[in-house]
Image (cartoon, grey):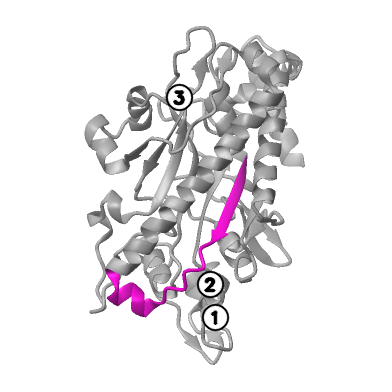
Amino acid sequence: MGFIGEDLFHFQATLEQSGSSLEEYIRENYVDKWANDSLFHGMAVRTTMVTAINNFLANEGLLNLERVQMSPVTDPLAHDVEHVPTIHYKGMPYVATHSMIYMKFLACFNSRLKGIYVDSPNIRLEIESPQRKQRGKYLIDFSQIDIELRRNRGLDLEAYLNEPERVKGILREDMEKALDFFERMIIAMVEGILEKNEDDLKALGVALEVPKQPFPRIKHDEMTEKYGRVAAEAKAGEDIPTQFFWVTGLMRENYDLIYPYLFPDGGKKEIKSFTSDMVYNYDICAKAINRETGKFLPALEILSGAIREWLFEPIVERLIDNRIIPERPEFENGQLVNIATLNGYGPFLSAASMKDKEGKPYFPDTLGGGIGVERTLYALLRGAKIEKIDDLTCFGKNPDSHPIFLF
């Protein structure tokens, strides 16, 4: 705690040199916000939103999973972060949870499960804007409702390698099921907010529309070809007339399914050669509606998910391709011979390789996604009263807003 006190001492001294004070800084950046009606209305909408989503998931038959906030392994992420926070306990280093993706997979080992959901902890030390611009949407400590559903297709490696048309047909069917599931979840969320929070929406100067199925879709390849790579979602949203829409086929995380990938001759397709039709993942983007003018604000991604890699061999190869592990695991008499070189992935890969008494893998074939709570609120409520994501959080830690976080 001594180091914290020293840092705060230097921060207070800097404020004093600039003609301000600690009291003035806390009042301006915290107290005034806590007492502000805009945050009150945002919290009211948040309460309904989270409750509606949780009720939908429970009513669909999914079971609630406990939070895992530290582990030897976490989501490596496809984008850069400053570093992964590490906690030492009982002589073992544990990393703070980027997301619970690997825990979700392992929790779905039980074949009786339809699926699971969890209010997942997410600590991602996002890099500050290099242009020192207020990007509005980032938090380094945020809430995400994580969902994973078993597909129960039972496709083995033999089918994966030798029956590509059959496998692609099944994957397309499951992709439609995934999009339908998450669309119905968003509809339940919006209906709940409109039923309970109309006065809060009016006070914030925004409107919501219950979306109709199916939501419009645009493939990532087509979107970037038409709009470029910078702010492509926002530009696409200008041409899409609905409040919610899909972007599909983004080359992203190592666990998002790409197919075909491994071939019968032992080769594999190069990652850079994949098109959106071969990447079975999806994002929901959303736009705020100005209540007075009826016009949309630029779109933001609020939910990301995918059909997952489910066979041990492609799981390992994807980890190697993404340079997350340096080599394939080697097993001998129940021991992982090269466990030291695999960092925290050793136990996960050991569990992922296991089979039951009939020789069937425990590792499930699943689809899933995560919806960012604060990100969704910001996407839908910004406008007349909400300028940045900080305005919707009591203790939001936006890397572009503060040089130091006091609470």
Label 2 is placed on what type of residue?
Phe
**Do labels 1 and 2 touch, CB within 8 Å?**
yes
The magenta stretch is 143-164
Number of on-image labels: 3
* Side (left or right) of 280 relative to 48: left
* Comes first in the chain, label 1 or label 2: 1
Q: Which mark is residue 341?
A: none
In this rendering, the answer to whether 335 lies above or below 315 is below
Say which element carries label 3.
loop
Examine the image and state in which quarter residue 186 appears: top right
Examine the image and state in which quarter residue 173 appears: bottom left
Q: Nearer the viewer, mark 1 or mark 3?
A: 1
Q: Residue at x 76, y 40 (%)?
A: 2
Label 3 is placed on what type of residue?
Arg
Q: Which mark is residue 132?
A: 3
Alpha carbon of mark 1 to alpha carbon of mark 3: how far?
48 Å
Tell me if residue 385 can be seen. Answer: yes
In this rendering, the answer to whether 32 lies above or below 45 is above
Q: Is residue 330 magenta?
A: no
Q: Nearer the viewer, mark 2 or mark 3?
A: 2
Q: Is residue 146 magenta?
A: yes
Tell me if residue 253 can be seen. Answer: no
Say which element carries label 2.
loop
Q: Residue at x 64, y 62 (%)?
A: 93
In this rendering, the answer to whether 255 lies above or below 364 is above
Residue with the mark numbered 1: 354
**Callout 3: few (<14), some (14-19), or many (20+) C-alpha neighbours within 10 Å?**
few
Say which element carries label 1.
loop
